[in-house]
Image (spheres, grey):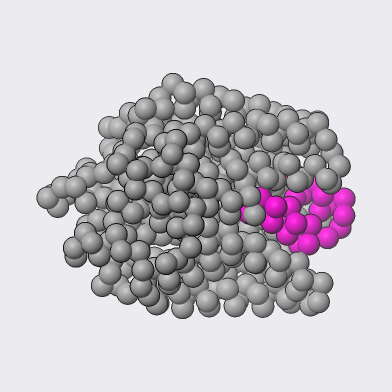
Amino acid sequence: MQRSQHTHLAGRSLVALAALNFFLADARDGLGPFLDGFLATHGWSPMTLGMLATIGGVLGMVAMPLFGAWVDSSRHKRALIVMPVVLVTGAALWTLFAPNNWSVFGGQSVTAVVGAVVGPALMGLTLGLVGEKAFSRQVSRNEFWNHVGNVVSLVGIYFVTLAFGIDGVVGLMIVTAIAAIFAVAAIDPDKIDHKVARGLGHDNGAPGPSGFSVLAGSRGLILLAVTLMIFHFGNAPMSRLIAQDFSIQLGTPFRTTAIITGISQVAMIVMALAAPFLIRRFGLATIFVIALVALPIRGAIAGAFDGFMSIYPVQILDGVGAGLIGIATPIAAERILSGTGRFNVGLAAVMTVQGVGASFSNVVAGWLTNFGGYGLAYWVHGGFAVLALAAFAAGHKSIAPSSKGDDAAATPSAVAVN
């Protein structure tokens, strides 16, 4: 496959990739942000919900590097997206119909394990379709369509619960899962360069190192993983706690969570539009700094104000921080690992390490909430994120190396599919 084919961002497969990201917003995570609000109104405590999130996170951590290596070696990347969509949707429906210990812990365990393959598979598929020069721009496009899909899904859930109750949520989940599968099928497998998809765009095709040796042998990748681990320890539980808090107060878990999550998703759309310009104009390191600064401010606002109106600045800052981190992470990993042939397993290793912070933070957040209320948890987790900024400052040149791709990154208007 010629390089020009990768950099030509048009055609059926790129449109299908946009549609896939749009529908995956709802199909890859099952109940996703609604789980905490739904279970909180069924009597589940913050500590129990924190344990549930931690168990799922640990299972995902164990599975992630194995799936990353699988994606690197597989020529069936489309199937590695379809399989999780089917299983995750089934697990979510099980939880909705029978929210007991077996369905909740069993369903979320299935979601954590099989869902761990979607991230590496989607990044590998994207890199294989567009090539490394256009990868930065395409990651921003993926994020744009993913967040647009989230907003549309949240609006849909808000109104179908008003009209049909829980049956409307079930119907919407089935529709989006089917649509995601059709979008995967529309991607032409012949347009995927599997050598480029694993990060072999620079070399002669010789096999690269395997497993966590990629992580252990790269200072930049280690520092990236540590920074993200600290960031996600601070950030991961906050939206969950906010959803629990106000779902209990208002008694409407699906509609309340739709509003709370929708605010952050709209902010993420703005960040996806702005990211290519910011990378081109200021460099990748600037993206990380903006994202890492947003979280301590978010925690301070959430801890200081307890009225429902506080969710607006709090969730906008979530969109800024988590939105930019979601774009910057695979771009940084691709730059660090370019030519190694282990992009997917290296990215999966980074995601595994960041998952340590995200997973165990949920138990800590649950304990803090039981001990001192939601406000204490917001202050502690927001404050902890200052350490992530310090870690990035110490190794920013290794974490976010410059690239000629910065100069080629598109302006915000390029996020729409041509």
Q: How many marks?
A: 0
Residue 155: x percent and y percent?
A: 71, 66
Question: Which quadrant: the C terminus?
Answer: bottom left
Which span is picked out in magenta? 241-265
Residue 218: x percent and y percent?
A: 30, 32
Query: At 26% across and 44% down in the image, what residue appears?
Result: 338
Q: Main secondary structure of the magenta part?
A: helix
- Give the left or right position of residue 376, taking residue 141 as reference: right
Query: At 39% across and 45% down in the image, what residue appears?
Result: 331
Asked if one can make out residue 72 in the rendered structure from this viewpoint, the answer is no
Query: At 41% across and 27% down in the image, what residue appears?
Result: 396
Q: Quadrant of residue 349?
A: top left
- Give the left or right position of residue 277, taking residue 215 as reference: right
Residue 205: x percent and y percent?
A: 14, 52
**Please, is residue 250 above or below residue 402 in the view?**
below
**Please, is residue 373 above or below residue 64 in the view?**
above
Of 148 and 386, the residue lying toward us: 148
Of 129 and 342, the residue lying toward us: 129
Question: Which quadrant: the N terminus?
Answer: bottom left
Q: Is residue 21 magenta?
A: no
Query: At 66% across and 26% down in the image, what residue appears?
Result: 383
Of 36 and 224, the residue lying toward us: 224
